[in-house]
Image: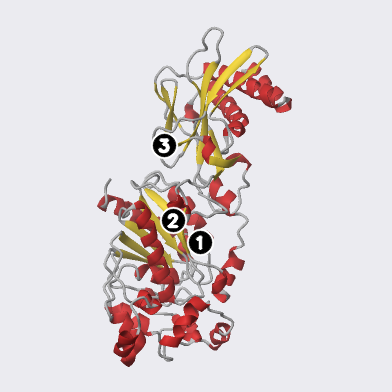
Amino acid sequence: MAAADALLKQAEHATATPAAVESLRAAEIAWGELDTRGGSIRHTTALPEDQRHALRILASATENLAPWFIGSNSQPEKTFSDQGCSYRVSATRAAKPGVYPLARLNSARPARKVPHTLCRNWHTEDGVGVPFAPSWSTPGDSGLRRFISSKRGYMEPLTGVLAFDGPAKPGGARCASLIGYDPTTISSVRLGRTDYPLAADFTAPIVEQTHDINELRLGLLGLIHPGALDAKLILLEPYDPKRIPLLLVHGLNSHPRMWKDVINDLRADPQLRGRYQFMLFYYPTGWPISYSAMRLREELAALEQQTGRPKKMVLIGHSMGGLLARMQVINPGQTIWNSQLSQQARSVDRQLPASHLARRIFLYQADPGIGREIYICTPHRGSGLADLSLTNLFVKLLSLPTTITGVLIDLPTTLATPSRMSSVKGLSPTNPLFTALDQLPIQVPHHSIIGDRGKGDTPHSSDGVVPYWSSHLASARSEVIVPGGHGSYDDPQAIREVRRILLLHLKANPR
């Protein structure tokens, strides 16, 4: 083992191929120290020190070799020869879900090098291999490509594992494999004939991909200048039809990065891991509520066209995002149309063409692909803060895009004024939308998480923005009060309640 350590030291100062060979020689020595004869190792922390040392050497060698095989221009196999030693390394195997060739990555930063910032908890698993915070290459499927952030790609963890495939043949190269594993799908790997737990870092990819996002600036931009950005449904991992989609929808003056701690804690949970796939919906929050709900509806329909109907998706919405989620699972008929257009509903109905934007916004059916919803601090009956004089001054700063204001010509002035169409004024309890929503049954099981700022005064409570009378739903399957304010989406008690509901949903929708 001392010789293996010395070889790794030499590799630090060697040029490319000699460094690879010295890393492989060290890994081969370490491999000989491991138990690869059969059976199962449950916890690497219980191994003798020499075997734990061997695993550390294998990890260092893996980290040194990985750059050779990452990226579209890399070779699927490569022979490294130097000073009479020869190794043939393959990085192509991808025979089952959760196994990825490293060529699918643009880059891969070792998770140990990612600063422990941004997320409240850091979730790791001890085991074999090197956890990476990877940058994934864009998938070849052009239909799915539109649902992936062009700048950031997937936010999926990956663990690289170096393994030797058998003894060296006389005069030939020793064969090894270097494979990437998704630890949300695979929890153990085989070294020789022995199963070892797979190392994992579930938090590093989230931090690596989102540390440079200015959440405040983007939230304000989407609120005040909603025409500058567009809505987008975002996949955070390769789409898997066997997993249940879990879609998170942010609220007013916010951005999808707000969900980082929620995703981090839920994805690392052993009972949820590999059963759900995380998605985000971004929308400029200055848009009218009903318009944003329509854009979410159309993004979900576009995804379904590419992937087929999902397995009973779960939607989680915070604040105004909860309203967008709710409007996916109601059958409004003419109720919302009539509430918005009042006495002029019939005449406008006769005048507008079938393709008019107003029809797409107000006339639709519930999405049958959604199986459950969770509302966090959601103003189901509005918020009085939308009627304050300071809010009215703020509304004057909003600039709606022409795609929305273009419908004003055809609609009654009682509805179609820029101030009334804005999301901020749309949250006023006087908005007829809320009266209409109260008349429309929610078609799926749903749950409420509500903040009371720790005052314990429910039903007279408020989260500081939304009063309890607005966030309460008598039809909810469960209601949990947490001691936080309006930002209680990432309160530890709220996350525990979300976990409980997701486990319940798994029982109701077995594989």
**Amino acid residing under circle 1:** Pro
Find residue 154 and report its horizontal and vertical position in percent: 50, 49
- Residue at x-position 32% and y-position 80%: 336
Image disc number at residue 186 = 3
Name the residue beneath numbered marker 1.
256
If you read the primary sequence from the N terminus, does the residue marked by circle 3 or circle 1 appear first? 3
Q: Residue at x 58, y 86 (%)?
A: 393
Label located before the other in sequence (3 or 2)? 3
Closer mark to the observer between disc 3 and disc 2 = 2
| Label 1: few (<14), some (14–19) or many (≥20) C-alpha neighbours in 10 Å | some
Q: Of the residues shown, which amino acid type is indicated by label 2?
A: Met
Is residue 257 at all visible to an observer of this figure?
A: yes
Circle 1 SS class: helix
Q: How many marks?
A: 3
Q: Is residue 335 above or below residue 43?
A: below
From the viewer's perspective, tell me whether residue 319 is left or right of residue 473: right
**Left or right position of 108 against 283:** right
Q: Does the rendering let one see residue 319?
A: no
- Image quadrant holding the N terminus, namely top right
10 Å crowding of disc 2: few (<14), some (14-19), many (20+): many
Per the model, the C-alpha gap separating discs 3 and 1 is 27 Å
Indicate which disc residue 381 carries.
none
- 347 over 102 or under it: above or below: below
Q: Which label was assigned to residue 279?
A: 2
The Cα atoms of the two marked residues, 3 and 2, are separated by 20 Å
